[in-house]
Each structure stands twice: as C-alpha cells, then as structure tokens.
Amino acid sequence: MAKAAVAKKKKVTLSFDGEPGVEVKVAGSFNEWSLDDKKKSKVMKEDKAGHYSINLFLPLGEHEYKFYSNGEWILDPKVEVKKLNRFGTFNGVITVG
C-alpha cells in the first residue's frame, strides 16, 4: 500500500520591532491571510519590550506575508524581497527551501 506524500516543512523565524505591549500578528499566503480564525491566526510573542517573534513551520516554496498591529498592515522592514499586491502596496516574500 502506498503512503500519502507528506509535505516537507521547515522552521522559519520572523521578528518585528514595534510598540511595546500590543498584539502583533503575522498573516500571509500560508494561513490564507487570516487574522481572526483561532486555528489559523498567528500571534507573535513579545520576547522583550517591543520585540516580537514567531516560529512558523512552512511548506517549501514562496510565501507572501505582512505583520498586523493596531489596525494596520505593516511590511516587514527587514525583508529583502517584496511583491506588489492587488491593493497597490507590497507584501514581504520569504522562500523556504
């Protein structure tokens, strides 16, 4: 009996420096841009005042993402690759491979 192929995933760490003591989320193509779905939403942990991070296990390939805090979408200022989205702004791009 053949086994179903298991998609390979790799650990990716994203970090964000911002206002201390607020909720920061990351959303992207890897979670259908979900901010509210409890199963899909990705809330970042505040490691120290104003520094947030999250470990994600993402499938191989290209993923677009942005941070979200205080009602605003925020492009990762550290990202090297950006892609224009349908709203005329940019998403960060991370390639897992």
Image (cartoon, rainbow, N blue to C red):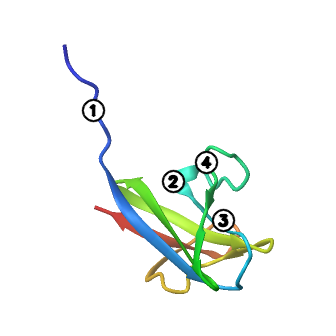
Q: Nearer the viewer, residue 50 or 84?
A: 50
Residue displayed at 64% across by 85% down: 50
**Marks 3, 2: nearer the viewer:** 2
Q: Which residue is labeled 1 in the image?
A: 5
Q: Which image quarter: residue 61?
A: bottom left
14 horizontally vs 21: left or right: left
Element under label 2?
A: helix
Q: What x and y, as percent, mark residue 68?
A: 69, 70
Would you say the residues marked 1 and 3 are in contact, meaning their CB atoms lie under 8 Å apart? no
Element under label 1?
A: loop
Give, as a three-letter code, the residue at label 3: Arg
Q: Which mark is residue 86?
A: 3
Q: What x and y, as percent, mark residue 19?
A: 71, 85
**Marks 1, 3: nearer the viewer:** 1
Counting the numbered discs, the total is 4
Q: Which mark is residue 30?
A: 2
Residue density around tag 1, few if under 14, some if 14–19, many if 20 or more, within 10 Å: few
23 horizontally vs 64: left or right: right
* Extreme residue toward the front, this view: 48
N-terminal label among 1 and 4: 1
Q: Which residue is labeled 4 in the image?
A: 40
N-terminal label among 2 and 4: 2
Element under label 4?
A: loop
Q: Nearer the viewer, residue 36 or 51?
A: 51
N-terminal label among 1 and 2: 1
Give, as a three-letter code, the residue at label 1: Ala
* Mark 1 → mark 2, Cα distance in angstroms: 19 Å
* Mark 3 → mark 4, Cα distance in angstroms: 22 Å
